[in-house]
Amino acid sequence: MIPYGRQDISQSDIDSVIAVLKSEYLTQGPCVPQFEAKIAGLVSAKYAVAVNSATSALHLACLALDLGAEDWLWTTPISFVASANCGLYCGAKIDFVDIDLQTFNISPESLEIKLKAASKAGCLPKVLIVVHMAGQSCEMESIYKLSKEYGFKLIEDASHAIGGRYKKSRIGSCAFSDITVFSFHPVKIITTAEGGVATTNDIELAEKMSNLRSHGITRDRRVMVNKSNEPWYYEQQALGFNYRMTELQAALGLSQVDRLEEFLVRRNRIAKNYDIELKNLPLKTPHVSEGTYSAFHLYVVRLDVAKARVTHSEFFNQLQNSGIGVNLHYIPIYRQPFYKKLGFPDKYCPNAEIYYAQAVSLPIFFGLSDIDQGYIVSTIKRILN
Ligand SMILES: *Cc1c(COP(=O)(O)O)cnc(C)c1O
């Protein structure tokens, strides 16, 4: 089976991890701060806080922005469940904003309409999490403007998007947001096995996140409640977690970041090939918005279900039966049984429903060979022609 995505591990990645295994520190050593500095430098953000997953980073980001039980968190229904779950971890109420059918990202128009209604009803969101679906940036300028007009905070879930660009700046620079989160799960652009990072330009948010990732404990005497000169003394001031990244993960990350450019070039090349090869078929290839450079974590096509001679599920099954590990990113989150219990009806967001009835993620990853891509293309043509 050709998977839809997978990691690429080089000898230098392996050497980098082995060096840590032979060193003094397996956790809380020098690699994590080095990795943080490297990510911050890469995306031109002032601070980066590394943690054990993007899910943890999203949770800490919500906590740092003081999301609590009386608050609303809004996000997109077309994402991994973690983009919404992080709000529930904080006890907040969740709602979904419909997507744009060209980009599969949150639609600024739908957002504005929903904000107007929420403003009248007195239930504006405290935090909006946008997701750069498949690696392509949302329309951050319009969304940022709305955040100022309606007074909410902005988190970018850029789990798909490290290395991507929006209007010449790297995603993660937080030019139009408070915090950006990246994932380093093996299917993503670069990997640390499990791992994530949050970037920000706000020192208070950075300090809060790094404090909460390690139990809410501080050893900084300047901020202590009790005055003590004892050398062993530390204080827990908040209820934090153990969300720390290990040295092994950071070492792998340091080595993988060096390969990011090469990964991005290859992914964009594969996407371009699909664009060319899949013309004149009853499906839509991904739209690339002006001023964006996608990291192409996913290559999502939409089957033209009115014109195609197979149904969406027949198309999907026939590809899987041919050894092509297609996937569907994502089932609208509000359709999950857990969310239905919170009261969401099945067809809550009309565009997300259209997307869900048509979308298929084709394999795209650094190690996908031209031969395998040729096989995928010819199989699609055989099924649809
Ligand atoms: C993968 C992913 C996450 C979760 O990342 P982990 O590092 O596995 O916790 C969150 N949001 C989106 C959009 C993702 O794709």
Image (spheres, rainbow, N blue to C red):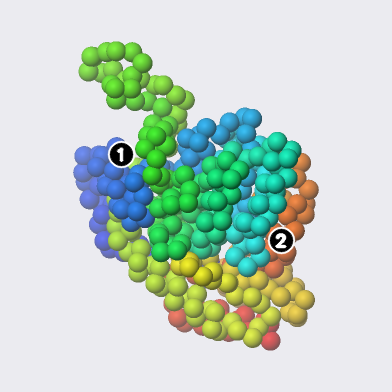
Judging depth in this view, the residue of 250 and 115 nearest the camera is: 115
Judging depth in this view, the residue of 350 and 248 nearest the camera is: 350
Q: Amino acid at mark 1?
A: Thr
Circle 1 Cα neighbour tier, 10 Å, few/some/many (<14 / 14–19 / ≥20): some
- Give the secondary structure at mark 1: loop
Judging depth in this view, the residue of 381 and 205 nearest the camera is: 205
Circle 2 Cα neighbour tier, 10 Å, few/some/many (<14 / 14–19 / ≥20): some
Q: Please give the label number shown on residue 351.
A: 2
Frontmost of labels 2 and 1 is 2
Which residue is depicted at the point 44% across and 24% down?
A: 238
- Give the secondary structure at mark 2: helix
Provide residue 241's location: percent of width, then percent of height. 45, 31
Judging depth in this view, the residue of 116 and 154 nearest the camera is: 116
Q: In the visual, does 296 lie left or right of 304?
A: left
Mark 1 residue's CB less than 8 Å from ligand 1: no
Q: Amino acid at mark 2?
A: Asn
Which residue is depicted at the point 76% across and 41% down?
A: 343
Provide residue 151's location: percent of width, then percent of height. 57, 41
Residue 316, picture quadrant: bottom right
Q: Which residue is mark 1?
A: 27
Provide residue 312's location: percent of width, then percent of height. 72, 70
| Label 2, label 1: how far apart the Cα atoms are | 45 Å
